[in-house]
């Protein structure tokens, strides 16, 4: 079931690349941009996350934390984060529960892979309410970052 604006964001506890457990509830009082992405080291995912990296000052100025989530292992994500110098948490949804809870999930992806996160963007406000939700069917498309920023500016 797709989440929509006004829904309470499903909480999650996922491990980051430093092997620390990150809980969405820990971010209460801050705005959070949750980005699901299919796979580390792929062209569009790399471009998307590097765009967020290059624009990190804008998001920080909007009191927003960025959390990138994929079904990759923490080890793969750690290498990806280091290689791309990403200044925000990448979280492993290896068991695919969080992507499913957010409706950001491909049962079947390319090359016969099953259970990959759909590229998606969610803005969650300081109270844990979804203020922007975009789940893309095509992995080749990027989220509307102007709409993400406009949403953050309105909070």
Image (cartoon, grey):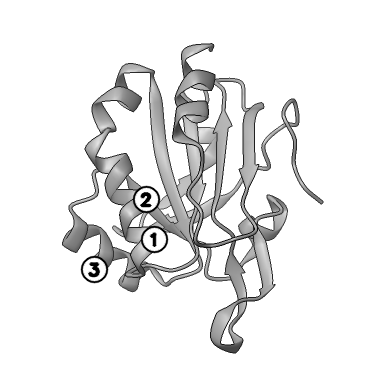
Establish if 8 lies above or below 107. Answer: above
Is label 1 in a helix, a strand or a loop? helix
Q: CA distance from mark 1 to mark 3?
A: 17 Å
State the image coordinates of residue 19 (x, y, percent, origin top left). 34, 60
Q: Which mark is residue 80?
A: none
Asked if disc 1 and disc 2 are in contact, CB closer than 8 Å, the reply is: yes
State the image coordinates of residue 136 (x, y, percent, origin top left). 61, 52
Residue identifier under label 2: 48
Of the image marks 2 and 3, the number of the one nearer the N terminus? 2
Q: Would you say 85 lies left or right of 153 here?
A: left
- Return the residue found at the far top: 154
Label 3: how many residues lie within 10 Å, few (<14), some (14-19) or many (20+)?
some
Q: CA distance from mark 1 to mark 2?
A: 6 Å
Is label 3 in a helix, a strand or a loop? helix
Q: Is residue 29 visible?
A: no
Residue 95, picture quadrant: bottom right
16 and 152: which one is in front? 152
Residue identifier under label 1: 44
140 and 62: which one is in front? 140
Label 1: how many residues lie within 10 Å, few (<14), some (14-19) or many (20+)?
some
Q: CA distance from mark 2 to mark 3?
A: 17 Å
Q: Residue at 75% across / 31% down in the picture?
A: 7
- Return the residue found at the far right: 1
Q: Would you say 119 lies left or right of 8 here?
A: left
Asked if disc 1 and disc 3 are in contact, CB closer than 8 Å, the reply is: no
Residue identifier under label 3: 79
Q: Residue at 43% across / 44% down in the picture?
A: 67
Is label 2 in a helix, a strand or a loop? helix
State the image coordinates of residue 62 (x, y, percent, origin top left). 38, 18
Of the image marks 1 and 3, the number of the one nearer the N terminus? 1
Q: Residue at 45% across / 47% down in the picture?
A: 22
């Amino acid at each position: 079931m797709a989440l929509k604006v006004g829904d309470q964001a499903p909480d999650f506890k996922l491990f980051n690349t430093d092997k620390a457990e990150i809980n969405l509830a820990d971010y209460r009082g801050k705005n959070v941009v949750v980005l699901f992405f299919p796979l580390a080291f792929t062209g569009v995912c790399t471009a998307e996350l590097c765009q967020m990296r290059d624009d990190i000052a804008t998001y920080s100025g909007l009191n927003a934390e960025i959390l990138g989530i994929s079904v990759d292992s923490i080890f793969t994500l750690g290498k990806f984060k280091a290689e791309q110098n990403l200044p925000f948490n990448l979280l492993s949804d290896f068991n695919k529960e969080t992507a499913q809870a957010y409706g950001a999930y491909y049962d079947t992806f390319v090359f016969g892979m099953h259970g990959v996160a759909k590229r998606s963007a969610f803005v969650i406000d300081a109270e844990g309410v979804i203020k922007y939700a975009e789940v893309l069917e095509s992995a080749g498309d990027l989220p509307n970052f102007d709409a993400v920023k406009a949403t953050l500016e309105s909070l």
